[in-house]
Amino acid sequence: MSSTIRLLLASALAVQAGAATIKIESGPGGLVFSPNETKAAVGDVLEFHFVAGNHSVVQGDFDNACHPATTGGFYSGYLPALNGENPNVFSVTINSTEPVAFYCSQGKHCQDGMVGVINPTNAMSFATYAAAAKSATQNVAPPAVFGGTVGPAPKETSSTVSPSGTASPTTSVTPSTSTKPNGAGIISVSCGAIVAAVGFALFLA
Ligand SMILES: *[C@@H]1O[C@H](CO)[C@@H](O)[C@H](O)[C@H]1NC(C)=O
Ligand SMILES: *[C@@H]1O[C@H](CO)[C@@H](O)[C@H](O)[C@H]1NC(C)=O
Ligand SMILES: *[C@@H]1O[C@H](CO)[C@@H](O)[C@H](O)[C@H]1NC(C)=O
């Protein structure tokens, strides 16, 4: 794909779908991220909430589980939630629709399955990454926070901006029920955007 087409696609997706905020909880009820798999479009923001325990989130390398991505990526540092949710969240902007694996770098949390995947495929999914993580010999934390911002959690999570003409924004309050319908809405809108962007790019060519 030419870089012109790619740029047009990315901007069409961002404009057409609107940037959504995708809430991911770290530590609810144990060593888990919830949801453990979700879709995200270019421009969407992953908002990691630290609700219990003392966890971090690191973008992982699919070929070397529990180790940081070899290029780019993100690391939140530790955001302890020992007396209720940590007041800060870690926000990461999604730059591509390639699968992204992430894990908690605390102790053996990664090996114990505290991992997740954005934009999973059959080969690169929560299940495949968690299986690889089980036998990882080390769980590695990057030296410093990067690739996102640590800051105060928004008051109310009505931050998900729905694509125009779909469900009301207030449906985002409960992440477990809202991320899938919103994701599906974004995907269906994005298909239209892709067709439009490709058509426009061909027109220019
Ligand atoms: C991953 O998430 C799915 C959907 O919420 C859930 O059914 C499943 O139990 C989770 N897997 C693990 C190992 O936590
Ligand atoms: C959280 O975990 C990190 C890494 O193990 C540690 O350095 C830090 O002291 C812990 N914080 C609390 C409040 O336990
Ligand atoms: C997106 O790009 C920015 C700037 O290059 C980078 O800092 C960040 O880590 C990237 N995000 C992801 C999820 O790779």
Image (spheres, rainbow, N blue to C red):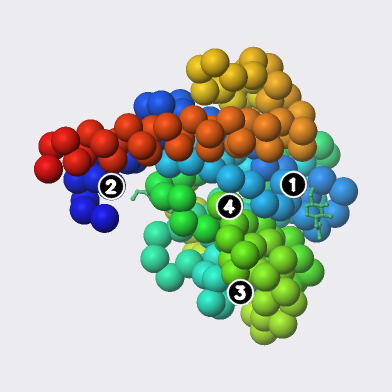
Residue at position x 45%, y 26% in the image: 18
Q: Position of residue 106 (x, y in %)?
A: 70, 64
| Dot placed on the residue nearer the N-terminal end, 4 or 1 | 1
Pick whichever, 22 or 75, lies toward us. Answer: 22
Q: Is label 1's Cβ within 8 Å of ligand 1?
A: yes
Mark 3 to mark 2 CA distance (whole Å): 29 Å
Whichever of labels 1 and 3 marks the residue nearer the N terminus, that label is: 1
Q: Residue at x 55, y 71 (%)?
A: 62
From the viewer's perspective, is the residue at label 4 or at label 1 nearer? 4
Cβ–Cβ below 8 Å for labels 1 and 3?
Answer: no
Residue type for callout 3: Ala
In the rendered view, would you say 55 is above or below 154? below
Look at the numbered disc 4 and give the secondary structure of its residue.
strand
Within 10 Å of disc 3 (Cα), the crowding (few <14, some 14-19, many 20+) is many
Disc 1 on helix, strand or loop?
strand
Please give the residue where the numbered disc 2 appears in the rendered image: 6
Q: Quadrant of residue 120?
A: bottom right
| Mark 1 or 2: the one toward you | 2
Q: Give whichever of discs 1 and 2 has the lower sequence position.
A: 2
- For label 2, the SS is helix
Q: Give the image location of residue 158, x and y in percent.
A: 64, 20
User: Which dot marks residue 34?
Assistant: 1
Which callout, 3 or 2, points at the residue further toward the start of the chain? 2
Disc number lying in front (3 or 4): 4
Left or right of 148? Residue 52 is right
Distance between mark 1 and mark 2 Cα atoms? 31 Å
* Pick the front one: 99 or 22: 99
> Dot 1, crowdedness within 10 Å: few (<14), some or many (≥20)?
many
SS state under label 3 = strand
- Note whether ligand 3 is within 8 Å of mark 2: no
